């Protein structure tokens, strides 16, 4: 359909011109995560200050879905609080499982739901988001007494 074409274009745009790809100096969290089903791997780095994600960069090898999803994810979390980023990750995984969720901040991200209907593709799409959640929970949350 033409909607699928639009989704494909959005994904290819992020794949061919990934946002926030590279190294982050002075990262507070560096997370490496592998998709066990294919062996593809992503490294995500985040700079967190005053509970806010100041910057995020990623690199890795992966399919167009995993790389474009990482590009979209890093765009979406920059400037967000860690709580907001965790909420985004939560809504994202629910959306990918087919739930009806609040799609605020999901402009490009929605394309992934449109094209990733199969479990293997869902794993590709969620890789970067899992890395982000892991990074926030492991590294940042060590220093905060809050219960999220
Ligand atoms: Fe490996 Fe998509 S096929 S992350
Ligand atoms: Fe991470 Fe509170 S900001 S646990």
Image: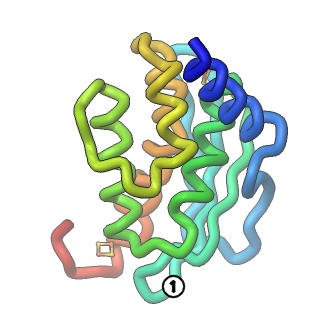
Q: Where is residue 21 in the image (x, y as percent from the top left)?
A: 77, 52
Q: Name the residue under label 1.
A: 49
Q: In which quarter of the image is residue 95?
A: top left
The 10 Å Cα crowd at callout 1, few under 14, some 14 to 19, many 20 or more, is some
Q: Is residue 104 above or below residue 47?
A: above
Q: Is residue 40 left or right of residue 13?
A: left
Can residue 52 be seen here? The reply is yes
Can residue 90 be seen here? The reply is no
* Residue 39 vs residue 102, the one in the foreground: 102
Q: Position of residue 106 (x, y in %)?
A: 46, 49
Ligand 1 positioned in quadrant: top right
Q: Where is residue 74 in the image (x, y as percent from the top left)?
A: 60, 56
Q: Quadrant of residue 76?
A: bottom right
* Mark 1 C-beta to ligand 2 under 8 Å: no
Element under disc 1? strand
Residue drawn 45% across the image and 28% down it: 113
Q: Is residue 118 left or right of residue 20?
A: left
* Residue 40 vs residue 97, the one in the foreground: 97
* Residue 96 vs residue 26, the one in the foreground: 96
Image quadrant containing the C terminus:
bottom left
Q: In this view, does 11 lie above or below 38?
A: below
Residue drawn 78% across the image and 60% down it: 23
Q: In this view, does 137 lie to the left or right of 107?
A: left
Residue drawn 47% across the image and 79% down it: 52
Image quadrant containing the N terminus:
top right
Question: How many marks can you see?
Answer: 1
Q: Position of residue 7 (x, y in %)?
A: 60, 28
Residue drawn 52% across the image and 48% down it: 107
Q: Which colour scheme is used?
A: rainbow
**Residue furthest left in the image:** 147
């Amino acid at each position: 359909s033409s909607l699928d074409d639009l989704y494909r274009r959005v994904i290819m745009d992020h794949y061919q011109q990934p946002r926030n790809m590279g190294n982050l100096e002075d990262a507070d969290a560096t997370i490496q995560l592998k998709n066990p089903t294919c062996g593809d791997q992503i490294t995500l780095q985040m700079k967190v200050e005053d509970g806010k994600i100041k910057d995020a960069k990623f690199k890795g090898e992966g399919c167009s879905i995993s790389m474009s999803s990482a590009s979209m994810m890093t765009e979406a979390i920059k400037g967000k609080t860690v709580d907001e980023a965790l909420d985004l990750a939560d809504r994202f995984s629910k959306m990918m499982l087919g739930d009806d969720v609040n799609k605020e901040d999901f402009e490009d991200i929605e394309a992934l739901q449109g094209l990733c209907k199969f479990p293997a593709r869902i794993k590709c799409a969620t890789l970067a988001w899992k890395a982000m959640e892991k990074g926030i929970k492991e590294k940042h949350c060590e220093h905060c007494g809050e219960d999220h």
